[in-house]
Image (cartoon, rainbow, N blue to C red):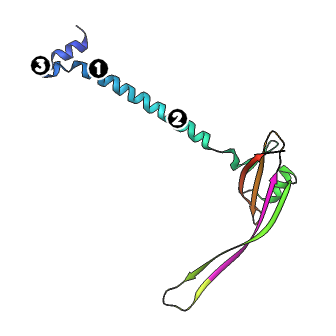
Amino acid sequence: MTELEASIEFLPPHRKSYEHIFNIGMIFNCFKVYAMKNITIWVLGLSLCSFNAAYAMRCGNRLVKPGDYKDDVLARCGEPDFVETHTKIVGRTLHFSGRTIDLQQYEEIQVDEWVYNLGRLRLRQYLRFENGRLKEVKSLGRGY
C-alpha cells in the first residue's frame, strides 16, 4: 500500500469519493506556479523591450545621456548636423489671498536643439539642451 493510499484510507467515507479532486488540485497548483513564472518572464521581457535606447545616444564608444553638459556632448560626438537656438520664458504667479500683492517669478531658459545624422544604417538623434544641460534625447527617422 502506498503512502497516498494509506492517507486516503483514514479519510472519512464522504471524502474518499473526492480522491480525484485532490490530484486535480495538485495539478492545478503546479499549473499556477508555472503560469506565474511564465507571466513574470513575460513582464520582465516586455519591460526590457520598452526600455528605449533613445534615452541615451552612443557616439563611437562613448555614451551621451540627459544631464551631460553641452561641451561634453560636443567633444564626444562632434558638430551636429542641425542646430537651432531659442529662448523660452518659464514663470509662475504666486497669489496670496487677502493681500494686494501678487508675486510673479519668471526665468529665461536658453534652449538648444541639435540633430545628429548618423548615416543610413542608424537613426537620426534629436538632443534638447536647456541652459547648457542635456534634457532630452530621442530618435527620429532613419538617417540619410
On screen, residue 99 versus residue 8, left or right, reads right
Label 2: how many residues lie within 10 Å, few (<14), some (14-19) or many (20+)? few
Do the CB atoms of the residues marked 1 and 2 lie less than 8 Å apart? no
In primary-sequence order, the first of circles 3 and 1 is: 3
Q: Amino acid at mark 1?
A: Asn
* Horizontal and vertical percent position of residue 142: 78, 44
Q: What's the CA distance linking mark 1 and mark 2?
A: 29 Å
- Please say whether residue 106 is one of the residues in the magenta stretch: yes
Q: Nearer the viewer, residue 12 or 31?
A: 31
The single residue placed furthest to the right in the displayed view is 79
Above-or-below relation of 2 to 109? above
Above-or-below relation of 83 to 20? below
On screen, residue 143 versus residue 108, left or right, reads right
The residue singled out by tag 3 in the image is 13
Q: Which residues are magenta?
A: 104-116
The residue singled out by tag 1 in the image is 23
Q: Residue at x 67, y 78 (%)?
A: 106
Q: Amino acid at mark 3?
A: Pro
Quarter of image, res 92: bottom right
The residue singled out by tag 2 in the image is 42
